[in-house]
Each structure stands twice: as structure tokens, then as C-alpha cells.
Image: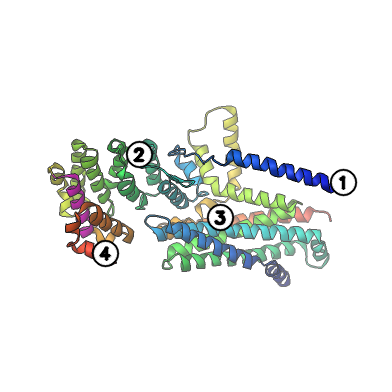
Amino acid sequence: MGYQLILYVLWGAVRDRLLLTVILSMAVVAGLSMFLGSAAIIEQSEFTRVFMAAGLRLVGVLGIVLFIVFFIRRSFDTKDVEFMLSRPIGRIKFILSYSAAFSVIAILLGAVCGVVVTLLAGQDFGAGQLYWCLTVMAEYIVIANVALFIAMVLSSASACAMATFGFYLLCRMSGQFLGIADSAILDNSLSSSFMNGLFQIISVFLPRLDLMAQTSWLVYGIENGAEVFMLIAQALIFSVFVLCACLLDLIRRQF
Amino acid sequence: MPQHIQIKIVFGLCLLVNLIFWSYFRSTQAEWLNVPPVPSERIAVAFGLGDKQFAYRNIALMIQNLGDSGGQVRSLDDYNYEELGKWLELQNDLDGRSKVMPYLAAYYFGAVQSPQKLVPVIQYLENVGSVGVDEKWRWLAQAIYLARYRLEDMDWALRMAAQLTALQTKIDDLPVWARNMHVMVMSASGEKEAALEIMMQTLESERDKMEPAEILFLADHICNDLLPPTRAAVTPLCIQLKNQ
């Protein structure tokens, strides 16, 4: 991996004021959560904690996706990518460096989320918070790599952002979709069977983001810590899988 | 005609039409659609983007503020309690540990003007309270009170009192007053006396396990609604509340 290339991307994040923007947005979300939480009749701190955690998680994803997509597309538009690939860096090293830099940003934002929730939502730091924070980081790493892949493949920034958000929503809802597909709600018509089969296939390529960063961990703690590590492992494997797809695409591309 | 005059004419016309639309919609208010239909648990989780707890809290706030929309406040009597009962059950499936929904059911929705509407609420409190975990038996006691004194269904209240008594096998520290709830049910005391008895006893035995807001609510209800002013003035709880 190119150490300097990683620094270049990280510097790009600083230059784009990503961190500042996301932290400001997080401050707004935290304020709104406190307001909403105080509107609850009882368990106000639990409401605040849940709204804050869920809101920050979403803001972080928005920040990461928009930054990566626009950073990559701008790099293509300004011929930065072609310029860098003309240097003795290699396409594999190029992608791995970008992925590493985006993952560092993802971990950083995940840590910010964890710190804000712990400090502002009034609760001692425990296993629930730790696992929540770790899975938010894992989720951000997955989304960062997916955004990188999509931005390398599609040429329109807005289409990339839409596709990545679509993927994220699909992952967050995959548990519900699978539950509906597995239940007897669907009839036996051809179209239902087709949709059911299609979703079963699609779900193979969806990491279970719905099981990650559950806000109930922040309220009641966590019962099965081992499962969390399975989820993190799945996220990391999926990130490698997406990176491989990205590499395959870049290696075959003609500039 | 010069182009800038044409643009000014279009601008003026748009402003005029906009004023017509404004006057047409000015008195139109958001229509209150009563308690919305209940989704399945899977769909409800979608309210939290796949996060059950987030969905639970979202829905809890929605239910809490159900009748307050667009500056209008609805009477509890206008609520569709059948549908509300289904929402409460759904919430119990999403998070059976939180106290928010039983609290709302017992102290807020339980205050509906027409007692016959209380059946789904009492059923919900019975379900929650009869599980026998933590201090959830309190909701069964509330269900008994609502059934006996609001709905005036003595048989149902006695059945629930028997359930509460049976919970002593699961809950070691079940207070004596709760174990003997059937005695209170069968007594001829009035609604206010019964409510006072239950709330005072609950405060005495469960204060450590209650939310500050819940303690405050019970104290306020006891001092301002249940006790006559002369008695409230000499009751230590009410004096303490007044000095807060």
C-alpha cells in the first residue's frame, strides 16, 4: 500500500472539510435527539440514547458515501486517477491504498459516534457501547468499500450516491425482506416465487447491517458478544470481496 | 412589448394565482386519521431501518403524541382503542422490557372517559403484568384496578387478582398488598380509595425501582386528584411534593 497515497486521500478528506461537516451534522443530530428524548413521558435518557445512536449512525453513512463518491469522481474528472496510474504504483496498490484511507476515515467516524453517544447520552461505558461502536466502524468500512467500488464503476456521482444508499438500505432491511420471503405471507404465484428466489440470491451478497449497531445494546447491554464478532468478520470478508470486484474491474479497464 | 414588461406581467399573474391558491387552502387543516392501522412486526421494524429498538422508540413517541397534530388536541374518547390495543401489543413484541408503553397504557390511555373502551388496554396490561419478570406485576395491579373500578368487571378483576397472587411463586419480593389484591377487589371501597391504596402502596414498596418521572406522576396524582385538599395538606408525601 502506498503510504503517501493514503495520506493524500486523508488530506483530501481534511480539505473537503468532511470531518468538520460530519461532526457539525452529528452535533445537530445530538441536539435533536436530546429534544426528542426530553419529549418522552418516561425513560427520557433511553429515548435520547437510541435516537442519538440511530441518527449519528445514519449521518456518518451519509458523510462517508458522499465524500468517497465525489472524491473518486472528481479524481476521474481531473485526470488524477490516470496521472497516478501512470506512476509506478500499480492498480492493485492504488485501490488498496484508497480502501485503506477510506477505512481509516470510517473507523475515525465510528469512534466519533461512539464517543458522542457515550458522553452525551448519559451512560457509563460498557460492553454494549463497545460492541455498538465496533459494529458501527465495521458497517462504515463496508459502506466505504462499496462506495469506492460503485464510484469506480459508474461515471455519474449522483448515480453512485443513489446506488450506494440503495445498497445500504437493502442491507439494513435485509432481515425483514428475508423474514417475509421465508414466511408464508407470499402466495404461490409465479411472480411471488420468482421475487422470493431473486431476493434469496441477492441476500447472499448483502452483509447483515440490520444486525449491527443495534441500539438495544445501548439500553439493555448485550447478551451474545460472540455473535458480534461473527458480524464484524462478515463485514470484513465482504469488504475484501467488494475490493476484489473493484480490482477486477480496474485491471480490465482501458484508459 | 419589451421582454422585461412581459416577465413582470407573468410575475404579477403568478402572484395573483398564488394568492388564490393560498385563500383556497388557508382554512384546510391536516385531518386527524385516528389511530392508524397496525403493521406487522416486520414492517414496524422498517420504521427503525431494521433496528428494533429504534423502531420501538419511534412508535412509542408516535403513540404518545397520537392525538396532538397540527395544533389540534383530541380527546382520548375519540381514539380507536381496538386499534390502539394492537399497537400496544406490537410494541410489547418489539421490546418487552421497556416501561414506556405499560406506563402510557395504565396512566394515560387508562384515563379515557368511556370505561367500556378500556378492554384492550386492560388486556394489554394483563399480558404484560402476568409474565412475572422484574417489577412488571405492577401493571397487572393497574389492570385489576381499571377492571374493577373503571370497567366494573368484578369477575375479570378477580381472575387477574388470582394471577397476581400466583406470581408470588415466581417473585420472592412481591409485596403483601399485591398478594392480597383480591381482598381489595372484593371490598366495597370506592374508586378513589382503591386508586389511593394501590398508588400509595406502589410508591412505598417499589419507589427504588421506579423512574423519577413515574414517582412524580404518582405523587402528583395522589396529592392533587385523589386526596381531599385538607388531607393532602398534612400528608408528608404531598408536603414534600409541594416543597420540590
**SS of the residue under disc 1:** loop
Residue B127 position, x and y percent, is: 30, 43
Of badges 4 and 1, the one in the foreground is 1
What chain letter is assigned to the residue under label 4?
B
What colour scheme does the image use?
rainbow
Query: Going from the N terminus, do you reach mark 4 or mark 1 first?
Result: 1
Few, some or many residues within 10 Å of mark 3 (<14, 14–19, 20+): some
Amino acid type at circle 3 is Gln
Residue B2 shows which numbered tag? 1
Q: CA distance from mark 2 to mark 1?
A: 64 Å
Q: Is residue B178 left or right of residue A70?
A: left
**SS of the residue under disc 4:** helix
What residue is shown with label 2?
Answer: B77
Of badges 4 and 3, the one in the foreground is 4
Residue A78 position, x and y percent, is: 81, 62
The answer, for residue B16, to whether it is visible in the render is: yes
What residue is shown with label 3?
Answer: A234
**Quadrant the N terminus of chain A occupies:** bottom right
Amino acid type at circle 2 is Asp
What residue is shown with label 4?
Answer: B242
